[in-house]
Image (cartoon, rainbow, N blue to C red):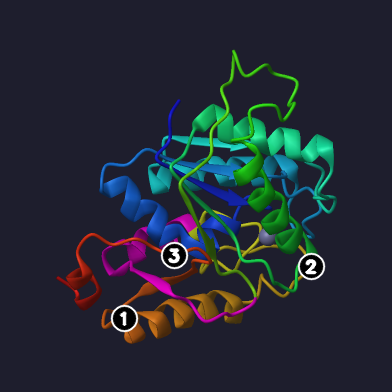
Amino acid sequence: MKCDVLFFGAHPDDVELGCGGTVHKLVKQGYQVGIIDLTRGELGTRGDEATRKQEAENAAKILGIAVRDNCGISDGHIDNSRENKAKVITMIRKYRPDLVILPYFSDRHPDHVNASKLVKECIYYAGTEKWPTGTPTSELPSHRPKQYLYYMLAEPFMPNVIVDITAEFEVRQKAFQAYKSQFFVPGHKSDDKETWISKPEFAESLIARVQFYGFQGGCRYAEPFFAEQPLKLDDLMMLAGK
Ligand SMILES: [Zn+2]
C-alpha cells in the first residue's frame, strides 16, 4: 500500500502524544496516513505487550489511519544496526511515503534519540538501490521520501513548523486516552505502579503544550515540528494565513 505520510515512533503511543492531532488532520484532508512503531513497547513499566497492542489498534481506529505496522525491534535496543536498518528501510520501501514524521533527535528517553537517528538514516538509504535488505529491489523497489519533519516528545525545541489542530483536539485526546495502561485517564483505575507518564500532570502538560503553540500560531491548539531542510512554498502568503 502506498502512504502519503508515514509517522514513526519508538513505542506505540509516541506518535499519539507527540502529534496525534496532525495525524487525524491529514486523514481528514484525504491523505493515506500510516504509523510505524519500531518496538512493541514491551519494557513499559505498566501494562503488558498484549494490552499495548490492543491499545495501539484502538488508537489507530480513533485516528482513522490506513495502516499501522510494527518493525518488531526489541524495546530498549533500537541501535543503529544493519538488522534494524533493514527493518526500517523495508517499511519505507513497502509504504513509499512522500513525507516522513519522526521523533526529535534530542530527548531524555534514549529510545527516542536512537529511533530518530535510525529512521533518519533509513530515509536516505531506502532510496539507495543497492542497500541490501534481503528483499531484492525487483520485488520492493528503492524509494526516498521527499521531506521529513521531527515531532516533539519529552524535550522542548524551538519549532519552525506548527500545525493548527483545534478541530482535531478532541480526537487527539481520545487517541491518547486509548492507552489506558500508560497514561492517566479520568475514571480508569489501575493497580500498576505510578510512573512519570501515568500522573495526571503529564496529560495536563501535553494539553498545555498544544495550547502554548496554539497561542503562538494564533489558534486554540497547535502541534510543534522541526524541519532541518528548507521548506519550499509556491505561495508565500500561506505564511500569513492566506
Ligand atoms: Zn516513547
Q: Nearer the viewer, mark 2 or mark 1?
A: 1
Residue at x-position 75% and y-position 20%? 134
Residue at x-position 69% and y-position 18%? 135
Q: Nearer the viewer, residue 144 or 100?
A: 144
The quarter of the image that holds ligand 1 is bottom right
Q: Which residue is mark 1?
A: 217
Q: Nearer the viewer, mark 3 or mark 1?
A: 3
**In the rendered structure, which segment of residues is drawn in magenta?**
155-175
Residue at x-position 33% and y-position 86%? 215
**Image quarter for residue 241?**
bottom left
Q: Is residue 143 left or right of residue 111?
A: left
Tell me the distance, in whole angstroms, between the alpha carbons under discs 2 and 1: 38 Å
Circle 3 residues within 10 Å: few <14, some 14–19, many ≥20? few
Image height of 101 relative to 153, above or below: above
Circle 2 residues within 10 Å: few <14, some 14–19, many ≥20? few
> What amino acid type is highlighted by mark number 3?
Pro
Q: Taking the image as drawn, is residue 191 in sight?
A: no
Q: Is residue 205 left or right of residue 219?
A: right
Circle 1 residues within 10 Å: few <14, some 14–19, many ≥20? some
Tell me the distance, in whole angstroms, between the alpha carbons under discs 3 and 1: 20 Å
**Image quarter for residue 216?**
bottom left
Q: Taking the image as drawn, is residue 10 in sight?
A: yes
Q: Which residue is mark 2?
A: 193
Numbered label attached to residue 230: 3
Residue 115 x/y as whole percent: 71, 54
